[in-house]
Image (cartoon, coloured by chain):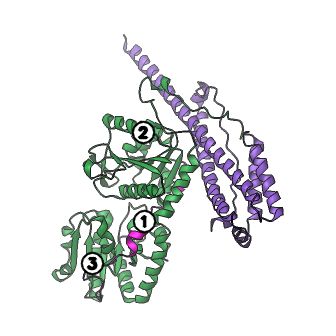
Amino acid sequence: MRIGIVCPYSWDIPGGVSAHVNDLAQALIRMGHYVSVLAPAEFDELLPDFVVSTGKPRAVKYNGSTARLSFGPLVARKVSKWIEEGDFDVLHVHEPLSPSLSVLACWAANGPIVATWHSAMDRSRMMLTLSKLGQTAMEKVSARIAVSEAARATLIKHVGGDAVVIPNGVDVSMFTNATPMFGWRGPNLSIAFLGRGDEPRKGLEILVDAYPQIRKSFPNVRLLIAGPGEPADTLKKLSKVDRASVTVLGMIAPQDKPSVLASGTIYVAPNTGGESFGIVLLEAMASGTPVVASDLEAFEQVLDFGRAGITFENENSDDLARVVCELLRDEAKRTELIRQGRLRAAQFDWNVVANEIVNVYESVRVPGVKVEPDLTGQFMGRLARGRITPEPRGEL
Amino acid sequence: MSSQGIFILVFVAFCIWYLSNQAGRLDRLHHRIDVAELALHGQLLRRGGIVAELAAVPGIDPALSALWGQAAHEVLILAEVASPARTQVEDELSEILVLTLGDQDEVNEIRSIALAASLLDELAQVSTRIQMSHQFHTDAVRDCLEIREQFLVRFCHLAGFAKPPVRFALADEFPEFLFN
Protein backbone atom coordinates (compact mmCIF):
# COMPACT_ATOMS: atom_id res chain seq x y z
CA MET A 1 0.00 0.00 0.00
CA ARG A 2 1.19 3.56 -0.65
CA ILE A 3 0.58 5.67 2.42
CA GLY A 4 1.00 9.43 2.81
CA ILE A 5 1.27 10.68 6.40
CA VAL A 6 1.01 14.34 7.39
CA CYS A 7 2.62 15.53 10.61
CA PRO A 8 1.59 19.11 11.47
CA TYR A 9 4.32 19.75 14.04
CA SER A 10 7.93 20.50 13.38
CA TRP A 11 10.17 17.52 12.82
CA ASP A 12 13.17 19.33 14.35
CA ILE A 13 11.77 19.45 17.85
CA PRO A 14 10.94 16.17 19.54
CA GLY A 15 7.28 16.00 20.51
CA GLY A 16 4.55 13.47 21.08
CA VAL A 17 2.93 13.70 17.66
CA SER A 18 6.09 13.73 15.57
CA ALA A 19 7.50 10.81 17.56
CA HIS A 20 4.27 8.93 16.94
CA VAL A 21 4.43 9.64 13.21
CA ASN A 22 8.10 8.62 13.04
CA ASP A 23 7.50 5.30 14.80
CA LEU A 24 4.35 4.59 12.82
CA ALA A 25 6.12 5.27 9.53
CA GLN A 26 8.97 2.96 10.47
CA ALA A 27 6.62 0.18 11.59
CA LEU A 28 4.68 0.48 8.31
CA ILE A 29 7.88 0.39 6.28
CA ARG A 30 8.95 -2.76 8.17
CA MET A 31 5.61 -4.28 7.18
CA GLY A 32 6.46 -3.63 3.54
CA HIS A 33 4.38 -0.54 2.78
CA TYR A 34 5.56 2.55 0.93
CA VAL A 35 5.42 5.55 3.26
CA SER A 36 6.03 9.24 2.70
CA VAL A 37 5.74 11.71 5.59
CA LEU A 38 5.08 15.41 5.03
CA ALA A 39 6.23 17.62 7.89
CA PRO A 40 7.58 21.10 8.55
CA ALA A 41 11.31 20.98 9.19
CA GLU A 42 14.10 23.50 9.11
CA PHE A 43 17.09 21.30 8.46
CA ASP A 44 16.53 19.17 5.37
CA GLU A 45 19.79 17.27 5.59
CA LEU A 46 18.95 15.72 8.95
CA LEU A 47 15.69 14.16 7.82
CA PRO A 48 15.14 10.42 7.39
CA ASP A 49 14.61 9.61 3.72
CA PHE A 50 10.87 9.02 4.09
CA VAL A 51 10.23 12.60 5.25
CA VAL A 52 9.44 15.45 2.87
CA SER A 53 9.85 18.93 4.36
CA THR A 54 7.60 21.93 3.82
CA GLY A 55 10.20 24.33 5.13
CA LYS A 56 10.69 26.25 8.33
CA PRO A 57 7.64 26.34 10.59
CA ARG A 58 6.35 29.31 12.58
CA ALA A 59 5.86 29.33 16.34
CA VAL A 60 2.22 29.46 17.45
CA LYS A 61 0.76 29.35 20.95
CA TYR A 62 -1.70 26.49 21.07
CA ASN A 63 -3.34 24.41 23.79
CA GLY A 64 -1.14 25.89 26.47
CA SER A 65 2.17 25.14 24.82
CA THR A 66 4.07 26.54 21.90
CA ALA A 67 3.62 24.65 18.68
CA ARG A 68 5.58 25.14 15.49
CA LEU A 69 3.25 24.99 12.53
CA SER A 70 3.27 25.52 8.80
CA PHE A 71 0.51 27.40 7.05
CA GLY A 72 -0.01 29.69 4.07
CA PRO A 73 -0.37 29.65 0.29
CA LEU A 74 3.21 28.63 -0.47
CA VAL A 75 2.97 25.67 1.84
CA ALA A 76 -0.41 24.79 0.30
CA ARG A 77 1.26 24.53 -3.10
CA LYS A 78 3.87 22.15 -1.71
CA VAL A 79 1.14 20.02 -0.16
CA SER A 80 -0.72 19.74 -3.48
CA LYS A 81 2.46 18.77 -5.25
CA TRP A 82 3.29 16.12 -2.65
CA ILE A 83 -0.18 14.59 -2.98
CA GLU A 84 0.01 14.59 -6.75
CA GLU A 85 3.43 12.96 -6.84
CA GLY A 86 2.78 10.55 -4.00
CA ASP A 87 0.04 8.56 -5.78
CA PHE A 88 -1.21 7.41 -2.37
CA ASP A 89 -3.83 4.77 -1.59
CA VAL A 90 -4.49 6.34 1.79
CA LEU A 91 -3.77 9.77 3.23
CA HIS A 92 -3.29 9.79 7.01
CA VAL A 93 -3.40 13.23 8.68
CA HIS A 94 -2.58 13.87 12.34
CA GLU A 95 -4.17 16.36 14.72
CA PRO A 96 -6.33 17.78 11.94
CA LEU A 97 -7.92 20.65 13.85
CA SER A 98 -4.81 22.69 14.42
CA PRO A 99 -4.48 25.32 11.68
CA SER A 100 -1.78 23.40 9.97
CA LEU A 101 -0.45 21.17 7.27
CA SER A 102 -3.08 18.59 8.16
CA VAL A 103 -5.96 20.88 7.29
CA LEU A 104 -4.17 21.98 4.12
CA ALA A 105 -3.70 18.34 3.15
CA CYS A 106 -7.39 17.60 3.68
CA TRP A 107 -8.31 20.58 1.52
CA ALA A 108 -5.91 19.54 -1.18
CA ALA A 109 -6.87 15.88 -1.40
CA ASN A 110 -9.76 13.71 -2.41
CA GLY A 111 -10.12 10.03 -1.67
CA PRO A 112 -9.61 7.81 1.37
CA ILE A 113 -8.44 10.06 4.22
CA VAL A 114 -7.78 8.85 7.77
CA ALA A 115 -7.32 11.29 10.64
CA THR A 116 -5.83 10.73 14.09
CA TRP A 117 -6.73 12.87 17.10
CA HIS A 118 -4.04 13.12 19.74
CA SER A 119 -5.07 15.78 22.18
CA ALA A 120 -7.65 15.96 24.88
CA MET A 121 -8.49 19.58 25.58
CA ASP A 122 -10.66 21.56 27.94
CA ARG A 123 -10.19 24.86 26.17
CA SER A 124 -13.19 24.63 23.94
CA ARG A 125 -13.27 28.08 22.43
CA MET A 126 -10.24 27.64 20.22
CA MET A 127 -11.54 24.28 19.14
CA LEU A 128 -14.93 25.73 18.22
CA THR A 129 -13.60 28.48 15.98
CA LEU A 130 -11.24 26.06 14.38
CA SER A 131 -13.88 23.42 13.91
CA LYS A 132 -15.88 25.91 11.83
CA LEU A 133 -12.78 26.66 9.84
CA GLY A 134 -11.82 23.05 9.61
CA GLN A 135 -15.33 21.79 8.93
CA THR A 136 -14.72 21.62 5.22
CA ALA A 137 -11.62 19.57 5.90
CA MET A 138 -13.31 17.29 8.41
CA GLU A 139 -16.09 16.36 6.03
CA LYS A 140 -13.60 14.68 3.78
CA VAL A 141 -12.16 12.45 6.46
CA SER A 142 -13.47 8.92 5.99
CA ALA A 143 -12.10 7.36 9.14
CA ARG A 144 -11.15 8.84 12.46
CA ILE A 145 -8.82 7.43 15.05
CA ALA A 146 -8.42 8.71 18.60
CA VAL A 147 -5.33 7.74 20.58
CA SER A 148 -7.24 7.45 23.83
CA GLU A 149 -10.72 7.55 25.33
CA ALA A 150 -9.95 11.10 26.46
CA ALA A 151 -9.10 12.21 22.92
CA ARG A 152 -12.21 10.44 21.64
CA ALA A 153 -14.37 12.30 24.17
CA THR A 154 -12.89 15.64 23.02
CA LEU A 155 -13.64 14.73 19.44
CA ILE A 156 -17.24 13.73 20.12
CA LYS A 157 -17.86 16.85 22.21
CA HIS A 158 -16.35 19.42 19.83
CA VAL A 159 -16.70 17.97 16.37
CA GLY A 160 -19.40 15.34 16.63
CA GLY A 161 -19.28 11.86 15.18
CA ASP A 162 -17.29 8.99 16.57
CA ALA A 163 -13.83 7.48 16.30
CA VAL A 164 -12.04 4.20 16.64
CA VAL A 165 -9.68 4.17 19.62
CA ILE A 166 -6.21 2.93 18.74
CA PRO A 167 -3.60 3.69 21.39
CA ASN A 168 -0.15 5.08 20.84
CA GLY A 169 2.57 2.54 20.26
CA VAL A 170 5.84 1.90 22.04
CA ASP A 171 8.90 0.35 20.47
CA VAL A 172 9.18 -2.18 23.29
CA SER A 173 12.34 -3.80 21.94
CA MET A 174 14.19 -0.49 22.38
CA PHE A 175 13.42 -0.47 26.12
CA THR A 176 13.40 -4.12 27.26
CA ASN A 177 17.14 -4.37 27.79
CA ALA A 178 17.60 -0.87 29.17
CA THR A 179 20.52 -0.59 31.57
CA PRO A 180 20.60 2.14 34.21
CA MET A 181 23.18 4.92 33.91
CA PHE A 182 26.44 4.31 35.75
CA GLY A 183 26.02 4.64 39.49
CA TRP A 184 22.25 4.66 39.44
CA ARG A 185 19.73 2.22 40.76
CA GLY A 186 22.23 0.38 42.88
CA PRO A 187 21.47 0.06 46.58
CA ASN A 188 20.45 3.75 46.62
CA LEU A 189 16.86 4.62 45.94
CA SER A 190 16.08 7.13 43.24
CA ILE A 191 13.19 8.87 41.53
CA ALA A 192 13.21 9.66 37.82
CA PHE A 193 11.32 12.47 36.07
CA LEU A 194 11.25 13.07 32.34
CA GLY A 195 9.63 16.06 30.68
CA ARG A 196 9.97 19.79 30.15
CA GLY A 197 11.21 21.30 33.38
CA ASP A 198 9.77 24.74 32.67
CA GLU A 199 6.26 23.75 31.62
CA PRO A 200 3.74 23.82 34.51
CA ARG A 201 1.54 21.12 32.93
CA LYS A 202 4.31 18.57 33.25
CA GLY A 203 4.03 18.99 37.01
CA LEU A 204 7.68 19.12 38.08
CA GLU A 205 6.65 21.60 40.74
CA ILE A 206 4.36 19.03 42.39
CA LEU A 207 7.23 16.56 42.54
CA VAL A 208 9.63 19.17 43.93
CA ASP A 209 7.07 20.10 46.64
CA ALA A 210 6.79 16.45 47.61
CA TYR A 211 10.52 15.80 47.51
CA PRO A 212 11.50 17.15 50.98
CA GLN A 213 8.83 14.95 52.59
CA ILE A 214 10.18 11.91 50.74
CA ARG A 215 13.71 12.83 51.82
CA LYS A 216 12.56 12.89 55.46
CA SER A 217 11.62 9.20 55.27
CA PHE A 218 14.41 8.20 52.88
CA PRO A 219 17.42 10.47 53.46
CA ASN A 220 19.47 8.72 50.75
CA VAL A 221 16.98 9.09 47.94
CA ARG A 222 18.07 10.95 44.78
CA LEU A 223 16.12 12.73 42.09
CA LEU A 224 16.92 12.54 38.38
CA ILE A 225 15.42 15.19 36.08
CA ALA A 226 15.73 14.84 32.31
CA GLY A 227 14.20 16.84 29.50
CA PRO A 228 14.52 20.20 27.76
CA GLY A 229 13.78 23.40 29.65
CA GLU A 230 15.60 24.87 32.65
CA PRO A 231 14.08 23.75 35.98
CA ALA A 232 16.34 26.01 38.09
CA ASP A 233 13.48 28.28 39.19
CA THR A 234 11.44 25.39 40.48
CA LEU A 235 14.43 23.84 42.26
CA LYS A 236 15.15 27.09 44.17
CA LYS A 237 12.53 26.02 46.68
CA LEU A 238 14.64 23.11 47.88
CA SER A 239 17.03 23.37 50.81
CA LYS A 240 20.75 23.17 50.02
CA VAL A 241 21.03 19.55 51.14
CA ASP A 242 17.99 18.47 49.18
CA ARG A 243 19.12 20.39 46.10
CA ALA A 244 22.47 18.59 46.23
CA SER A 245 20.72 15.25 45.75
CA VAL A 246 19.07 16.38 42.51
CA THR A 247 20.70 15.64 39.16
CA VAL A 248 19.56 17.67 36.17
CA LEU A 249 20.46 16.12 32.82
CA GLY A 250 18.78 18.61 30.49
CA MET A 251 17.70 17.51 27.05
CA ILE A 252 18.62 13.91 26.31
CA ALA A 253 19.05 12.05 23.02
CA PRO A 254 16.28 9.57 22.15
CA GLN A 255 18.70 6.64 22.36
CA ASP A 256 19.52 7.56 25.98
CA LYS A 257 15.90 7.58 27.07
CA PRO A 258 15.74 3.88 28.02
CA SER A 259 18.73 4.06 30.35
CA VAL A 260 17.47 7.29 31.93
CA LEU A 261 14.10 5.68 32.60
CA ALA A 262 15.77 2.55 33.96
CA SER A 263 17.86 4.67 36.35
CA GLY A 264 14.96 5.40 38.66
CA THR A 265 13.79 3.03 41.37
CA ILE A 266 10.48 4.69 40.61
CA TYR A 267 9.38 6.80 37.65
CA VAL A 268 7.10 9.69 38.58
CA ALA A 269 4.73 11.42 36.12
CA PRO A 270 3.12 14.31 38.05
CA ASN A 271 1.46 15.89 34.96
CA THR A 272 -1.44 18.15 35.88
CA GLY A 273 -3.47 17.99 32.66
CA GLY A 274 -3.53 18.25 28.90
CA GLU A 275 -2.30 14.68 28.54
CA SER A 276 -4.35 12.47 26.30
CA PHE A 277 -2.25 9.36 26.49
CA GLY A 278 1.01 9.07 28.40
CA ILE A 279 3.47 7.31 26.14
CA VAL A 280 6.37 7.91 28.50
CA LEU A 281 4.58 5.87 31.15
CA LEU A 282 4.60 2.89 28.82
CA GLU A 283 8.25 3.49 28.02
CA ALA A 284 9.11 3.48 31.71
CA MET A 285 7.13 0.27 32.17
CA ALA A 286 8.90 -1.32 29.20
CA SER A 287 12.25 -0.33 30.77
CA GLY A 288 11.28 -2.19 33.93
CA THR A 289 10.65 0.81 36.17
CA PRO A 290 7.56 1.01 38.41
CA VAL A 291 5.39 4.03 37.61
CA VAL A 292 3.70 6.53 39.92
CA ALA A 293 1.46 8.98 38.05
CA SER A 294 -1.21 11.61 38.69
CA ASP A 295 -4.73 10.26 38.40
CA LEU A 296 -5.55 11.83 35.02
CA GLU A 297 -8.02 9.70 33.13
CA ALA A 298 -5.57 9.01 30.31
CA PHE A 299 -2.96 7.80 32.82
CA GLU A 300 -5.46 5.58 34.65
CA GLN A 301 -6.24 3.89 31.36
CA VAL A 302 -2.60 3.33 30.45
CA LEU A 303 -1.88 2.00 33.95
CA ASP A 304 -4.84 -0.38 33.58
CA PHE A 305 -6.57 1.20 36.61
CA GLY A 306 -3.92 0.41 39.18
CA ARG A 307 -2.78 -2.98 37.93
CA ALA A 308 0.31 -1.75 36.09
CA GLY A 309 1.15 1.36 38.09
CA ILE A 310 0.06 3.52 41.02
CA THR A 311 -1.72 6.87 40.87
CA PHE A 312 -1.93 9.78 43.32
CA GLU A 313 -4.41 12.63 43.54
CA ASN A 314 -3.63 15.15 40.80
CA GLU A 315 -1.82 18.33 41.99
CA ASN A 316 -1.60 17.01 45.55
CA SER A 317 2.07 16.82 46.51
CA ASP A 318 1.31 15.39 49.98
CA ASP A 319 -0.47 12.47 48.36
CA LEU A 320 2.41 12.03 45.92
CA ALA A 321 4.89 11.89 48.81
CA ARG A 322 2.73 9.33 50.62
CA VAL A 323 2.41 7.07 47.56
CA VAL A 324 6.11 7.27 46.68
CA CYS A 325 7.19 6.51 50.28
CA GLU A 326 4.88 3.51 50.45
CA LEU A 327 6.28 2.13 47.23
CA LEU A 328 9.91 2.77 48.23
CA ARG A 329 9.25 0.76 51.39
CA ASP A 330 7.61 -2.18 49.61
CA GLU A 331 10.04 -4.05 47.40
CA ALA A 332 7.64 -6.94 46.70
CA LYS A 333 5.11 -4.48 45.36
CA ARG A 334 7.75 -2.92 43.08
CA THR A 335 8.72 -6.32 41.66
CA GLU A 336 5.08 -7.07 40.96
CA LEU A 337 4.60 -3.67 39.27
CA ILE A 338 7.67 -4.24 37.09
CA ARG A 339 6.27 -7.58 35.94
CA GLN A 340 2.78 -6.19 35.26
CA GLY A 341 4.26 -3.09 33.62
CA ARG A 342 6.24 -5.10 31.11
CA LEU A 343 3.15 -7.14 30.21
CA ARG A 344 1.10 -3.98 29.84
CA ALA A 345 3.71 -2.29 27.64
CA ALA A 346 3.81 -5.31 25.30
CA GLN A 347 0.14 -4.72 24.49
CA PHE A 348 1.15 -1.34 23.06
CA ASP A 349 4.08 -2.52 20.99
CA TRP A 350 4.26 -0.76 17.62
CA ASN A 351 3.94 -4.02 15.73
CA VAL A 352 0.55 -4.61 17.36
CA VAL A 353 -0.60 -1.01 17.02
CA ALA A 354 0.53 -0.57 13.40
CA ASN A 355 -1.44 -3.65 12.47
CA GLU A 356 -4.59 -2.10 13.90
CA ILE A 357 -3.94 1.09 11.97
CA VAL A 358 -3.50 -0.88 8.75
CA ASN A 359 -6.91 -2.43 9.45
CA VAL A 360 -8.35 1.08 9.45
CA TYR A 361 -6.59 1.91 6.16
CA GLU A 362 -7.97 -1.25 4.61
CA SER A 363 -11.46 -0.53 5.83
CA VAL A 364 -11.64 2.78 3.95
CA ARG A 365 -9.51 1.98 0.94
CA VAL A 366 -10.85 0.80 -2.38
CA PRO A 367 -8.47 -0.85 -4.81
CA GLY A 368 -8.17 1.43 -7.82
CA VAL A 369 -9.25 4.56 -5.98
CA LYS A 370 -6.25 6.77 -5.26
CA VAL A 371 -5.86 9.91 -3.23
CA GLU A 372 -6.11 12.64 -5.85
CA PRO A 373 -5.41 16.35 -5.74
CA ASP A 374 -8.60 18.28 -5.09
CA LEU A 375 -8.78 21.34 -7.28
CA THR A 376 -11.81 23.04 -5.73
CA GLY A 377 -9.49 25.53 -4.10
CA GLN A 378 -8.68 26.86 -7.54
CA PHE A 379 -11.28 28.86 -9.44
CA MET A 380 -11.62 26.56 -12.43
CA GLY A 381 -11.05 23.46 -10.40
CA ARG A 382 -14.67 22.83 -9.64
CA LEU A 383 -15.42 22.41 -13.33
CA ALA A 384 -12.27 20.52 -14.18
CA ARG A 385 -12.48 17.89 -11.48
CA GLY A 386 -12.59 14.27 -12.55
CA ARG A 387 -14.34 11.86 -10.22
CA ILE A 388 -14.72 8.17 -9.66
CA THR A 389 -17.83 6.53 -10.96
CA PRO A 390 -18.85 3.88 -8.47
CA GLU A 391 -21.58 1.35 -9.06
CA PRO A 392 -25.09 2.84 -8.96
CA ARG A 393 -26.27 3.23 -5.41
CA GLY A 394 -29.46 1.37 -4.59
CA GLU A 395 -31.02 0.72 -1.25
CA LEU A 396 -28.51 -1.26 0.69
CA MET B 1 -25.44 53.41 -6.84
CA SER B 2 -27.49 53.96 -3.72
CA SER B 3 -26.39 52.42 -0.47
CA GLN B 4 -29.49 50.26 -0.60
CA GLY B 5 -28.35 48.87 -3.94
CA ILE B 6 -24.93 48.03 -2.58
CA PHE B 7 -26.52 46.33 0.41
CA ILE B 8 -28.69 44.17 -1.85
CA LEU B 9 -25.71 43.33 -4.03
CA VAL B 10 -23.63 42.24 -1.04
CA PHE B 11 -26.55 40.23 0.30
CA VAL B 12 -27.07 38.42 -3.01
CA ALA B 13 -23.35 37.73 -3.29
CA PHE B 14 -23.37 36.28 0.21
CA CYS B 15 -26.36 34.04 -0.63
CA ILE B 16 -24.66 32.74 -3.74
CA TRP B 17 -21.45 32.07 -1.83
CA TYR B 18 -23.34 30.32 0.98
CA LEU B 19 -25.37 28.10 -1.33
CA SER B 20 -22.39 27.17 -3.45
CA ASN B 21 -20.50 26.36 -0.25
CA GLN B 22 -23.29 24.08 0.97
CA ALA B 23 -23.48 22.41 -2.44
CA GLY B 24 -19.73 21.84 -2.28
CA ARG B 25 -20.03 20.24 1.15
CA LEU B 26 -22.81 17.95 -0.07
CA ASP B 27 -20.74 16.98 -3.07
CA ARG B 28 -17.78 16.06 -0.87
CA LEU B 29 -20.01 14.02 1.42
CA HIS B 30 -21.63 12.11 -1.43
CA HIS B 31 -18.18 11.36 -2.73
CA ARG B 32 -17.09 10.11 0.69
CA ILE B 33 -20.17 7.88 0.97
CA ASP B 34 -19.46 6.38 -2.44
CA VAL B 35 -15.93 5.45 -1.43
CA ALA B 36 -17.05 4.16 1.99
CA GLU B 37 -19.68 2.01 0.35
CA LEU B 38 -17.20 0.52 -2.09
CA ALA B 39 -14.78 -0.21 0.73
CA LEU B 40 -17.44 -1.97 2.81
CA HIS B 41 -18.56 -3.84 -0.25
CA GLY B 42 -15.00 -5.05 -0.87
CA GLN B 43 -14.52 -6.25 2.70
CA LEU B 44 -17.85 -8.12 2.68
CA LEU B 45 -16.93 -9.83 -0.58
CA ARG B 46 -13.59 -10.81 0.90
CA ARG B 47 -15.32 -12.38 3.88
CA GLY B 48 -17.60 -14.38 1.56
CA GLY B 49 -14.54 -15.60 -0.29
CA ILE B 50 -12.72 -16.64 2.89
CA VAL B 51 -15.75 -18.55 4.21
CA ALA B 52 -16.16 -20.32 0.87
CA GLU B 53 -12.48 -21.32 1.01
CA LEU B 54 -12.88 -22.46 4.60
CA ALA B 55 -15.83 -24.66 3.57
CA ALA B 56 -13.65 -26.31 0.95
CA VAL B 57 -10.76 -27.15 3.32
CA PRO B 58 -10.30 -30.94 3.44
CA GLY B 59 -10.97 -32.37 6.89
CA ILE B 60 -13.69 -29.91 7.90
CA ASP B 61 -16.84 -31.46 9.34
CA PRO B 62 -19.15 -32.01 6.33
CA ALA B 63 -22.11 -30.42 8.10
CA LEU B 64 -20.08 -27.24 8.77
CA SER B 65 -18.74 -27.30 5.26
CA ALA B 66 -22.26 -27.46 3.81
CA LEU B 67 -23.52 -24.62 6.04
CA TRP B 68 -20.57 -22.34 5.28
CA GLY B 69 -20.55 -23.18 1.60
CA GLN B 70 -24.23 -22.40 1.23
CA ALA B 71 -24.10 -19.13 3.18
CA ALA B 72 -21.00 -17.93 1.34
CA HIS B 73 -22.58 -18.85 -1.98
CA GLU B 74 -25.64 -16.73 -1.18
CA VAL B 75 -23.38 -13.77 -0.45
CA LEU B 76 -21.20 -14.19 -3.47
CA ILE B 77 -23.96 -14.56 -6.06
CA LEU B 78 -25.67 -11.47 -4.70
CA ALA B 79 -22.41 -9.61 -4.49
CA GLU B 80 -23.05 -7.33 -7.45
CA VAL B 81 -26.43 -6.26 -6.21
CA ALA B 82 -26.88 -3.58 -3.57
CA SER B 83 -30.27 -4.44 -2.15
CA PRO B 84 -32.12 -5.23 1.08
CA ALA B 85 -31.55 -8.87 0.19
CA ARG B 86 -27.82 -8.17 0.53
CA THR B 87 -28.17 -7.09 4.14
CA GLN B 88 -30.18 -10.21 4.83
CA VAL B 89 -27.67 -12.69 3.42
CA GLU B 90 -24.74 -10.91 5.08
CA ASP B 91 -26.52 -11.04 8.41
CA GLU B 92 -27.30 -14.70 7.88
CA LEU B 93 -23.64 -15.38 7.19
CA SER B 94 -22.64 -13.50 10.36
CA GLU B 95 -25.19 -15.47 12.34
CA ILE B 96 -23.94 -18.79 11.01
CA LEU B 97 -20.36 -17.80 11.87
CA VAL B 98 -21.36 -16.85 15.41
CA LEU B 99 -23.21 -20.15 15.80
CA THR B 100 -20.52 -22.39 14.38
CA LEU B 101 -17.51 -20.59 15.84
CA GLY B 102 -19.17 -19.58 19.10
CA ASP B 103 -17.14 -21.95 21.25
CA GLN B 104 -13.44 -21.76 22.08
CA ASP B 105 -13.00 -25.56 21.88
CA GLU B 106 -14.68 -25.69 18.53
CA VAL B 107 -12.48 -22.91 17.16
CA ASN B 108 -9.38 -24.65 18.50
CA GLU B 109 -10.40 -27.88 16.84
CA ILE B 110 -10.84 -26.21 13.46
CA ARG B 111 -7.56 -24.38 14.02
CA SER B 112 -5.79 -27.72 14.31
CA ILE B 113 -6.58 -28.45 10.68
CA ALA B 114 -3.60 -27.42 8.62
CA LEU B 115 -5.16 -25.08 6.06
CA ALA B 116 -7.90 -23.72 8.29
CA ALA B 117 -5.77 -21.88 10.85
CA SER B 118 -4.58 -19.11 8.54
CA LEU B 119 -8.07 -18.75 7.07
CA LEU B 120 -9.49 -18.25 10.57
CA ASP B 121 -6.91 -15.51 11.18
CA GLU B 122 -7.91 -13.85 7.94
CA LEU B 123 -11.55 -14.16 8.92
CA ALA B 124 -10.84 -12.44 12.24
CA GLN B 125 -9.02 -9.65 10.42
CA VAL B 126 -11.73 -9.13 7.83
CA SER B 127 -14.39 -9.12 10.55
CA THR B 128 -12.63 -6.23 12.29
CA ARG B 129 -12.37 -4.38 9.01
CA ILE B 130 -16.05 -4.93 8.21
CA GLN B 131 -17.00 -3.52 11.60
CA MET B 132 -14.90 -0.41 10.98
CA SER B 133 -15.97 0.03 7.38
CA HIS B 134 -19.56 -0.20 8.52
CA GLN B 135 -19.05 2.41 11.21
CA PHE B 136 -17.30 4.79 8.82
CA HIS B 137 -20.06 4.35 6.24
CA THR B 138 -22.72 5.09 8.85
CA ASP B 139 -20.77 8.20 9.98
CA ALA B 140 -20.61 9.49 6.42
CA VAL B 141 -24.33 8.90 5.84
CA ARG B 142 -25.18 10.72 9.07
CA ASP B 143 -23.01 13.71 8.17
CA CYS B 144 -24.63 13.87 4.76
CA LEU B 145 -28.23 13.57 5.94
CA GLU B 146 -27.61 16.33 8.48
CA ILE B 147 -26.99 18.78 5.64
CA ARG B 148 -29.57 17.37 3.25
CA GLU B 149 -32.27 17.92 5.83
CA GLN B 150 -31.58 21.65 6.18
CA PHE B 151 -34.45 23.76 4.89
CA LEU B 152 -32.44 25.88 2.45
CA VAL B 153 -30.68 22.87 1.02
CA ARG B 154 -33.99 21.15 0.29
CA PHE B 155 -35.64 24.35 -0.91
CA CYS B 156 -32.88 25.10 -3.41
CA HIS B 157 -32.60 21.47 -4.42
CA LEU B 158 -28.86 21.55 -3.75
CA ALA B 159 -28.52 17.77 -3.60
CA GLY B 160 -29.45 17.63 -7.27
CA PHE B 161 -30.35 14.20 -8.50
CA ALA B 162 -28.15 12.31 -6.03
CA LYS B 163 -30.27 9.73 -4.25
CA PRO B 164 -30.51 10.17 -0.50
CA PRO B 165 -27.89 7.94 1.11
CA VAL B 166 -29.12 4.92 3.03
CA ARG B 167 -27.63 3.37 6.14
CA PHE B 168 -26.44 -0.17 5.70
CA ALA B 169 -28.27 -1.85 8.60
CA LEU B 170 -25.77 -4.65 9.25
CA ALA B 171 -25.94 -6.49 12.54
CA ASP B 172 -22.30 -6.23 13.61
CA GLU B 173 -22.04 -9.64 15.21
CA PHE B 174 -18.87 -11.62 14.97
CA PRO B 175 -17.60 -14.70 16.79
CA GLU B 176 -15.44 -13.30 19.57
CA PHE B 177 -13.35 -16.44 19.98
CA LEU B 178 -11.71 -15.82 16.65
CA PHE B 179 -9.80 -12.92 18.11
CA ASN B 180 -7.81 -14.79 20.73
Amino acid at the residue labelled 2: Ile
Q: Main secondary structure of the magenta part?
A: loop
Q: Secondary structure at mark 3?
A: loop
The region drawn magenta spans A161-188
Marks 2 and 3, the one that precedes in the sequence: 2
Q: Is residue B71 visible?
A: yes
Q: Are marks 2 and 3 in contact (CB under 8 Å)?
A: no
Q: Which residue position is annotated with label 3? A: A181
In this rendering, is residue B166 above or below A120?
above
Q: Which residue position is annotated with label 2? A: A83
Amino acid at the residue labelled 1: Val
Chain letter belonging to callout 2: A
Residue A170 bears which disc, if any? 1
Q: Is residue A194 visible?
A: no
Is B78 contained in the magenta span?
no
Q: Residues within 10 Å of mark 3 (few under 14, many from 20)?
A: some
In this rendering, is residue B23 above or below A326?
above
In this rendering, is residue A154 above or below B157?
below
Q: Could you tell me residue A258's position as x and y percent?
A: 34, 72
In the figure, what tint was chain A given?
A: green
Could you confirm whether marks 2 and 3 are on the same chain? Answer: yes
In the figure, what tint was chain B given?
A: purple
